[in-house]
């Protein structure tokens, strides 16, 4: 490898890496505001995991010594001593990250963050490199047939889209997307980001396609020209579609049309002439648009970024177009070439789609796939990352106060902004209401405390617990833990009931300070307490309970030094069970904990 070729590969790698930035801009711009941080984080995390896993496994499967035309058998976990191989890996790792990011767009706004990481890891480790081996390893079975996918219309783009298609099917549509036979339009959060992202992708794609030559030769100019003209003709196609089928030129159709043109030419950018490239780019937009309409309106598949149509169908068209227009190799007829290209497209689809279905169904069974409905409504920024945008928080606070009528809250005022001015005047209104209702509110609070709080420990009593459960836990997605003080009778008998009461108060204060905001803690009676945990996962509930047990064990009580507790934990097994059933099961677990020697947490 000459110095100039090495430089070209590295520069192209840098450009391909910028595609992650472009995809991030487009995705954050296209989804709703409440999910922008989540999709940006997904683009960041899949870059990290995909490159690591590609280094560990994927690169070897893809470019290692061939075995039966199916997989590579070496070059796993390369040590960096082969300097030329380093350059190839660096370039190909960027491609792997690109393939995974395509999936992110298809499953956006409803997949769990950790579930998506599993998808990124397994696709990079196995699905992507195996298909890549078939096509790009010189001994791969598709390469031996004569299959041509120069820079990855199928290997990178369609593969990512087909896995994304499997994900959208298993995940199902976003809440409210399809209602009463109609498709609801979810307005993008930032149209400018979409446009900026297209510019970035457009620029980075020159490295994606021309860098795939792996040499700085005069043919690079042809590849760059084909890429450029195909992309702009994709934009022309989008403009034409808008003239015929839409009232105005929408940001999404123009932006996605340009990307479709880029995807379409990627397979044949080194083998088509400029006129053929223009045609491929122009038709790619129509393939993208009508496939997206079919998927959305007929099949009710919800793809927030049209990733399946842009990368999957346009990529398949571009790959088959190579067979239609490019020069076949010696001894191969035009029909043979088209057939081989079609076989390559179909084999990549079948392999990646079926394994994608298996992967997403596996995550579904493990409850790692879709976020809970309330989290989807709230937005994945908050539920997955505990992150909020200031102006969104202000508006949601105002809406929340209006819906609940709780005038005791105050809306956050962001200084020197328009929304801050609105919040300020709204707070003035709230202050007036608070002054009028202060006496009544104080009286209501006193009555509520007497009715729903334990007099001694100041925590919820039974009535208060049931009132909060009916208010905060409408679904049965929670666990119940019973906490019992070990040998409490001996404390009363030895030190007196006053000391026993002191222990109850200190214990209540300690546990109240350790439980999470959304959990409920109440005195059930005597030395028994009940903890309602906001999770239906018994393993999580057991872990939380174990931490509380250890906190109590290490706490120094004022009068008796050390006290231990035993805990029993249970959850709803089915919708037929009621609270009393779960409580009985938790009590059985508590009895087992006591029988096993106390100071333990048992689950039922």
Image (cartoon, helix red, strand yellow):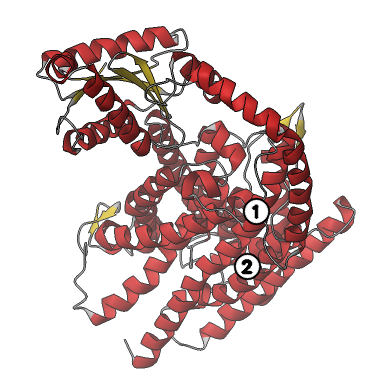
Q: Which mark is residue 324?
A: none
Tell me the distance, in whole angstroms, between the alpha carbons under discs 1 and 2: 32 Å
Q: Is residue 108 above or below residue 337?
A: above
Q: Is residue 437 left or right of residue 558?
A: right
Q: Is residue 402 left or right of residue 154?
A: right
**Residue occupying image coordinates x 32% and y 33%:** 511
Residue 531 at x, y percent in the picture: 36, 24
- Mark 2 = which residue? 197
Label 1 CA crowd tier, 10 Å (few <14, some 14–19, many 20+): some
- Mark 1 = which residue? 412
Q: Is residue 170 left or right of residue 36?
A: left
Residue 166 at x, y percent in the picture: 50, 39
- Could you say which quadrant of the image residue 285 lies in? bottom right
Q: Residue furthest left?
A: 597
Can I make out residue 155 in this image?
no
Look at the image and tell me in which quarter the C terminus lies: top left
Q: Is residue 4 above or below residue 292?
A: below
Give the SS element for disc 1. loop
* Nearer-the-camera pick, 475 or 390: 390
The nearer-to-camera label among 1 and 2 is 1
Nearer the N terminus, badge 1 or badge 2?
A: 2
Q: Is residue 66 above or below residue 407?
A: below
Residue 196 at x, y percent in the picture: 66, 70
Can I make out residue 20 in this image?
yes
Q: Is residue 576 above or below residue 69?
A: above
Look at the image and tell me in which quarter the N terminus lies: bottom left
Residue 316 at x, y percent in the picture: 57, 53
Give the SS element for disc 2. helix
**Residue occupying image coordinates x 50% and y 66%:** 20
* Nearer-the-camera pick, 505 or 168: 505
User: Could you tell me how many numbered marks the image carries?
Assistant: 2
């Amino acid at each position: 490898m000459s110095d100039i070729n090495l430089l070209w590969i590295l520069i192209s790698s840098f450009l391909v890496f910028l595609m992650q930035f472009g995809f991030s801009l487009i995705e954050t711009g296209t989804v709703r505001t409440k999910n922008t941080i989540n999709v940006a984080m997904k683009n960041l995390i899949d870059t990290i995991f995909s490159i690591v896993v590609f280094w560990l496994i994927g690169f070897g499967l893809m470019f290692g010594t061939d075995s039966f035309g199916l997989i590579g058998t070496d070059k796993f976990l390369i040590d960096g001593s082969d300097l030329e191989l380093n350059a190839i890996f660096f370039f190909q790792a960027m491609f792997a990250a690109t393939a995974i990011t395509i999936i992110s767009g298809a499953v956006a706004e409803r997949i769990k963050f950790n579930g998506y990481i599993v998808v990124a890891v397994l696709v990079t480790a196995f699905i992507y490199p195996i298909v890549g081996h078939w096509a790009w390893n010189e001994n791969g079975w598709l390469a031996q047939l004569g299959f041509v996918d120069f820079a990855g219309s199928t290997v990178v783009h369609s593969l990512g889209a087909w896995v994304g298609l499997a994900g959208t099917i298993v995940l199902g549509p976003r809440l409210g997307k399809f209602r009463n036979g109609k498709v609801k339009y979810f307005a993008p959060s930032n149209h400018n980001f979409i446009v900026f992202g297209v510019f970035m992708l457009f620029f980075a794609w020159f490295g994606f396609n021309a860098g795939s030559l792996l040499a700085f030769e005069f043919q690079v100019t042809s590849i760059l020209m084909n890429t450029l003209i195909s992309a702009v003709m994709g934009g022309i196609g989008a403009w034409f579609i808008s003239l015929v089928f839409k009232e105005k030129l929408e940001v999404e159709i123009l932006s996605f049309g340009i990307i479709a043109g880029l995807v379409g030419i990627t397979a044949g950018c080194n083998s088509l002439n400029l006129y053929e490239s223009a045609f491929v780019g122009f038709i790619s937009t129509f393939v993208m648009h009508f496939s997206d309409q079919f998927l959305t309106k007929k099949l009710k598949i919800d793809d927030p970024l049209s990733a399946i149509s842009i990368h999957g169908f346009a990529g398949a068209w571009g790959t088959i177009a190579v067979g239609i227009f490019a020069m076949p190799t010696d001894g191969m007829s035009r029909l043979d070439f088209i057939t081989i290209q079609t076989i390559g497209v179909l084999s990549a689809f079948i392999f990646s789609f079926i394994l994608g279905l298996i992967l997403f169904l596996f995550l579904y069974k493990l409850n790692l796939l879709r976020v809970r409905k309330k989290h989807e409504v709230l937005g994945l920024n908050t539920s997955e990352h505990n992150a909020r945008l200031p102006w969104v928080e202000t508006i949601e606070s105002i809406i929340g106060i209006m819906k609940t009528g709780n005038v005791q809250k105050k809306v956050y005022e962001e200084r020197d902004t328009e929304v801050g001015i609105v919040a300020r005047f709204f707070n003035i209104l709230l202050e007036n209401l608070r002054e009028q209702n202060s006496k009544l509110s104080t009286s209501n609070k006193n009555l509520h405390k007497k009715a729903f709080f334990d007099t001694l420990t100041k925590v919820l009593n039974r009535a208060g617990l049931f009132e909060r459960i009916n208010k905060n836990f409408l679904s049965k997605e929670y666990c119940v833990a019973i906490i019992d003080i070990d040998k409490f009778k001996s404390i009363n008998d030895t030190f007196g009931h006053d000391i026993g009461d002191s222990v109850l108060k200190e214990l209540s204060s300690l546990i109240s300070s350790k439980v999470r905001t959304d959990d409920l803690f109440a005195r059930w009676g005597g030395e028994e307490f009940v903890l309602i945990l906001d999770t239906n996962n018994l393993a999580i509930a057991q872990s939380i309970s174990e931490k509380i047990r250890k906190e109590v064990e290490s706490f120094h009580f004022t009068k008796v030094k050390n006290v231990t507790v035993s805990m029993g934990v249970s959850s709803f097994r089915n919708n037929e069970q009621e609270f009393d059933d779960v409580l009985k099961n938790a009590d059985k677990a508590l009895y087992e904990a006591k029988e096993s020697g106390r100071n333990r947490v048992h689950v039922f």
